[in-house]
Image: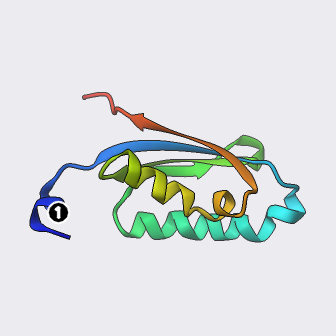
């Protein structure tokens, strides 16, 4: 990674993950998903993440260089990678305080 890449501002992206598999099928992948989000948080890339009501999915707002980087990150999430969830990815613009 170049110095320029380190200095470039990161955009925020929101990924919504909706589990489509049964709880029994998705169980291990759900635990892996939580671990993956915690790993991104430890890397300083998560702004907000958590489970959705009824525990049928996740929402995460995270930093990425661009849409391609955000998509690559999302596609590596265990539930998405395993084909056990539908998902959407959008650029997220935080309101200025």
| Rendered location of residue 2, percent (x, y) | 14, 68
| Rendered location of residue 18, percent (x, y) | 70, 45
Secondary structure beneath label 1: helix
**Front one among 78 and 44:** 78
Tell me if residue 40 comes above or below residue 48 in the rendering. below
Q: Quadrant of residue 87?
A: top right
Image quadrant holding the N terminus, namely bottom left
Tell me if residue 46 comes above or below residue 52 in the rendering. below
What residue is rendered at 36% in x and 68% in y? Answer: 43
Image quadrant holding the C terminus, namely top left
Q: Number of marks in the image?
A: 1
**Front one among 13 and 58:** 13
What residue is rendered at 80% in x and 48% in y? Answer: 20
Tell me if residue 95 comes above or below residue 13 in the rendering. above
Q: Quadrant of residue 77?
A: bottom right
Q: Label 1 belongs to which residue? A: 6
């Amino acid at each position: 990674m170049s110095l320029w890449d380190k200095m470039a501002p990161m955009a925020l992206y929101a990924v919504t993950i909706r589990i489509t598999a049964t709880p029994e099928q998705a169980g291990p992948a759900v635990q892996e998903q939580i671990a993956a989000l915690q790993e991104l948080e430890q890397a300083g890339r998560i702004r907000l993440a958590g489970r959705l009501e009824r525990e049928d999915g996740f929402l995460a707002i995270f930093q990425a260089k661009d849409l391609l980087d955000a998509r690559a990150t999302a596609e590596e999430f265990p539930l998405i990678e395993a084909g056990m969830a539908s998902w959407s990815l959008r650029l997220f613009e935080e309101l200025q305080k």
